[in-house]
Image (cartoon, grey):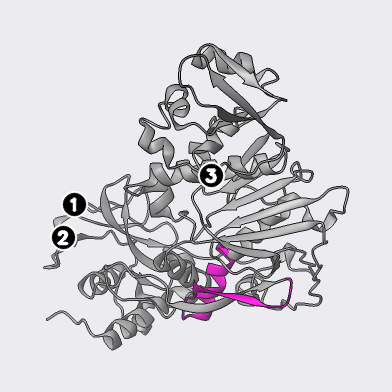
Amino acid sequence: MRLRAAWDNESMRRRLNSPFQDRWLHLLGTALVLVPFALGYSAAARADDSSKVEKCDHKFGTVAVSEPQGGWLYLRQYNLSSPSELLRTMVQHEIAISGRLQIGTSDKLRQRVLTWRGVAEVTKQFQVPTMCLDATMPDASIIKVTHPRFRLKVDIRVAMPASVRIRQILRTPTSQTKLIDGKHCEKHREEMRRYILQRWLEVGRQKTLVITQIGYAEWLRGKLPAEIAIGHYNAIAGLDQYRDVRLEILIGRPQPGPKAVEALAATLSGLMPDCIGDDERFNWYPRIRRGIRLRDGSGVAVMGEQHPDDLCEAIRQQITEAELMQAIGRGRAVNRDTSSPLDLDLALDVVLPIVVGEVDIWKRPSLLIDTAAQGVMLESAIDRVHIWPELWPNVKAAERAKRIPSLPGFEPVTYQLVGPKMNRRIGHFDRSLIPNPAAWLEQRLGPLRIIP
């Protein structure tokens, strides 16, 4: 009978973990592979001797293990006879992670494997008094893994200058499913692209930086004006070339799943954390209420994730919140003044340790933003269909865009097509891009006259 109780699984994890806390060097380089062959303790070791193959009735099948000469006698003190016993215990009790010992899948071998991950100690020559400086200092529980005598001496906090305008937009379609690999991700990608264009137009087409997930960053390349730089999370720490941007936009967030965080916590501590779920089903973080702090002293409540294990939560925050703070730092907001203002847009629902100027709810940008980037917005639905059929395939679709976005640099121009019963129409032009609206309209709509 297979043990499935949570108490039994936890007991097994503790047993499996304990041998590797102090004696991990004995296992370095070992790979145990499930079905149909094994990689041994060394390149010379092979598992082709059928007498060394142990049978297992679990769904993963045969277990093949190569053991070093002399065996694993020291493991007896833990009531575990060999790595094959460890492997059998993990497989039969469906324990995927046990401290620094994990069962996973090798894409290269296309098989289930038993792997070990650990943390190297700081070598003796570097065990000297050390000063750590970091804008996003990890929690002490993480630092003490390699620096057990760590003490936080100074926590410096700097207020954002009044010339920095921070705006957070909630409920944006920026999750992995909506923006990267979901069924309707192309629609959401286009909406976010138009949002970027709209904000770029609103700040007068000045230098802009967009930081987002790598998948969306790659999709955006070549689809935005040259004045808009694109970066992605986990590749922006320390960069200084964006210190003079007028606008910075953060889209989405880096967020690992609970299993990835729990595996990292097990590796760092050598102990099994309190896990979210104990099976192969999809499990996500519990949700808690947090508050976005506003400049006027009020706040806006949002729901956010929190892992119940303290070390796991510290790791999750270092991957998510700390990386977002690193991204914010690319615009060098603390160095701004009235001569170098910065607009910072946060298109995400994460609560960060900053004071926000305003909080808005996501609204889809108008399709007219695409034409505004070209320097023109037309009020006539018929003319929109005639010039941009890829945006508006018919008049009914074009009529949905009733409100003309309020953008700087545009001025209205009234025109009338030549012919009977032609009504006057209005177009809005940016003359820095289209200095002669009459010629532009005639080229696309035919003979017309401009009405002063």
- Please give left or right for residue 352 compared with residue 303 in the image: right
Q: Is residue 302 magenta?
A: yes
Picture coordinates of residue 208 (x, y %)?
Answer: 69, 41
Name the residue tied to disc 1: 36
CA distance for labels 1 and 2: 7 Å
Q: Marks 3 and 1, Cα distance to the nearest angstrom?
A: 65 Å
- Is disc 1 placed on a helix, strand or loop? loop
Residue at (88% x, 48% y) in the render: 339
Name the residue nearer the viewer: 85 or 383.
383
| Of 328 and 442, the residue lying toward us | 442
Numbered circle sitting on residue 403: 3
User: Mark 3 vs mark 1: which is more N-terminal?
Assistant: 1
Question: Which residue is at 83% across, 61% downward?
Answer: 161
Query: Residue at 53% of width from left, 80% of height from top?
Result: 310
> Dot 2 corresponds to which residue?
62
Q: Secondary structure at mark 2?
A: loop
Of the image marks 1 and 2, the number of the one nearer the N terminus: 1
